[in-house]
Amino acid sequence: MQLHMQNMRLHIIRALLIAHNEGFEELHDFCEIDELHEVKYLFCKELKRLKGNGPTAQLWVQYFEMVQLAKNFIEAERTGDFHQHLKYVRDMLPYFHASGHNLYAKSAHLYWQDMLSIKNKQKKMNLEELNKFSQLGYFTIRRNDKFRSGTWTDMCIEQNLMKHIKTSGGLIHGRGYEASVICKFISFSVVLVEITDAMESYTKVSYQSSEQHVDTSIARIFRDVSDLSKLVEFFERRNPFPMTSNIMSIGTGVIGSDKINCYKAKEIGNLAFKAIINDSFGSVKIGRKNKVLPLKATTSSVKIDDEIVSIDPTLIFQRASLSIQTKGDMARYLECELATYPLSLFNESGMRKAEKQQVQFYTNFNQMKDISCQKDSYFVIDGCFLLEKTYWKSAASVREIIDHYVDSIISKYSSNCCVVFEGYPEQVGECHTKVAERIRRQNKNLGHEVQFDESGTIFQNQEKFLSIDKNKVRLIQLICKELKKRNISIKIAEEDANVLIVKTAIQQMNEKNKTRIVGVHIDLLVILTAKARDMNNIFLYRQSKDNLDAYSSKSFKYPELNSIVLFLHAFSGCDTTSALYNQGKIKLLKLFTKSNDLLEDAQKFYDPNASVEEIAKAGIKIICRLYGAKAKEKQLHELRYDQFAKLSKRGPVKLEALPPTAGSALQHAYRTYLQVQLWLGNKKKAVDWGWRRKGSTIVPIYTADPLYPQDVLQKISCSCKSGCKIKSCTCKKHGLFCSSLCVSCNTETCSNIVEPNIEVPENGLLDVEENSQFMENIIEELDRLDESDESDEETTDNSNDGENIEPIAKKKKIK
């Protein structure tokens, strides 16, 4: 590239020397010098080469071409070059299409082809007028005879006519804004020009601008030099033509996804341009599919299990309430989740997390007294804690951020330490279950992937920046490089680092030196309690606001439960398991302190050879006891019904407040067993214990059982093929609108559909509180069953309600 630049400079210097020696005064003559043609050829050749560097380089070359196109269009208008004007209008058309400016695309296309055929329009313009219009620059408006004084028609209208109309004394202020008044105002403006000229001549006062172009003034030259230096500085720090297959912002480092195609604007616009040829102007419809996606459309959000389930939960409640015949029906329906995912274990973000419970769990551990942060100790530092709790400002250079991290380690702790970072595998393996939690956190703080190196600058907020795994990996690599230079030990785990942190601390412990783990995650203290029960010289330092709390491996307040502390933490919710709705860690602890018979069930989760059946039985038993079941055996669906009946007396019932179904409880128990085994160092296949493959990653299994009662779905859905116009339609009989459950019905053919069903993704279920009216219907139905068996009358009432709904549906359909 430097060689090309040197060659172009030499050709430009030669061209200037030729112009000086030949005495060229006209710009046209200067542009015809062969040396300048050679410069143009070399420049175009270099641009073509740079395009091959990747999408980012193509975007910047395209940007240059678009700016040059705009400049050429302005020049054609200013100089009155009609043919060049049309050429550049034509060149703009693909960009109008690609950017989604459809009205500009249609109107400019129509204008362009009308102007091309202007010669063939008879009785519109004679040859003399045509010559002036197209050859002498009369198509543009000129206020004087200067070469570049051409002005756009709409600009003249705004700057002159509309300016006078809108200013004080104009038509808008104090006068009628009618057609006759406007006509007089415009006609009289011509006379005023002559009066103005006469007054200027009489007073010998006139306004004239210099023949010199405004852009060549001294002030403008200084401004241009200042702006140019800023641009040069910007591009010296950021290469606009990087060798990369990604589309990225060289300013912020944001990387676009594969869907970002703005660098192909001309190519995509030409396709749209050709697609409307031979169509009439009025019938042209330009779709959005040919609109390019700009880089700002990039998001780093990741969706898991994003299949759309077209079943409105409200519809299920309707059908369930209308299908109840006996008490057993409701109990049977509650064997299913009645939602698109188990609400007691999951929410719209994924697994339920009791973040406050995680912090409160520390209250079950005694803090150590008089344990100062001694520099002679060996420190094992959690890399996640370091990244997230060492704060830096946005718009900081990467070099400053790295130095800040390393200096913070040495000043707060010691260079006699080991920093342990989490691993972020590119391919999710059979034991990599933390991916779901990382996706949940990423969706919570939507950031962007940033391409950076040591010389770069990070403009994103720290929290959003670190929410993207690829950003974190790049930063960890740079920090590790600096730590190695300063002889500080580092370790990188395969995935989760908590076990490796505790293991490293145990390896470094000896009688003389105390080992201190630095971190805030409750997992560290739980694993330390389980694995270092008999060790006295290992401590966990937890930063809480302005204090530094210290804990030992013997801090647990319930020594009799030391043997099952891993199970207690995993079963009540950790990074890879769900927290049960309103069933916190403290409640589970109290349950085990009072129920010694459950200890044997909890111990099964520590057995590396435990069977699926053993874990399932133990898990369901513990969940039943957690929700208040007595010591005697009780099925989960029975417990769900009992809880539903109990809660219904207080008002509308939230389904998440009910115990999980048997199918979802089994999967929760399996995930708990898997996590306990991973903490113990026993690798198990996640797909065998509550997880499943989903593309390149793994996701938790909700349940192996049906989410909805199949008989309800089958009973109250129709198979009409005549548009549901007959009274025998099953949905009409029950006073319900047709839905997606009805195989042959859609919004175009069915007369019993008001609106399309609400599409409910697995990560966006409607709030159950919205269904309170239907829940009240169910409660009333249960109360009625307790008093009498008049189900036929109730069914008739529901049918009558449906008859009242029918005319409304028809009105909306007609509308």
Image: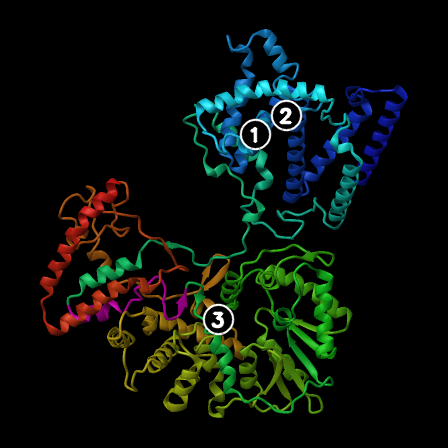
Residue 472 relative to residue 435: left or right: right
- Which element carries disc 3, helix, strand or loop? loop
Gap in Å between the C-alphas at discs 2 and 1?
Answer: 18 Å
Q: In the image, is 102 to the left or to the right of 799?
A: right
| Depicted 31 relative to depicted 252: above or below | above
User: Tag 2: residue type?
Assistant: Thr
Three-letter amino acid code at disc 1? His
Q: Residue furthest right?
A: 21
List the single residue furthest toward the front.
203
> What residue is shown with label 3?
576
Residue 602 placed where, x, y %? Answer: 42, 84
Viewer-closest of 243 and 124: 124
Residue under pointer 2: 151
Closer to the eye: label 2 or 1: 1
The amino acid marked with disc number 3 is Thr
Q: Residue at x 66, y 79 (%)?
A: 380
**Considering the numbered disc 1 on the image, is that residue within a helix, a strand or a loop?**
helix
Of 300 and 675, the residue lying toward us:
300
Quick check: is 345 in the magenta stretch? yes
Q: What is the span of residues highlighted in magenta in the rendered image?
A: 326-347
Residue 458: x and y in percent read 66, 58
- Residue 542 located left or right of residue 334: right
- Real-space CA distance between mark 1 and mark 3, rounded to the nearest whole angstrom: 71 Å
Question: Which picture quadrant has residue 496?
Answer: bottom right
Q: Which residue is mark 1?
A: 164
Q: Nearer the viewer, residue 476 or 533?
A: 476
Render colour scheme: rainbow
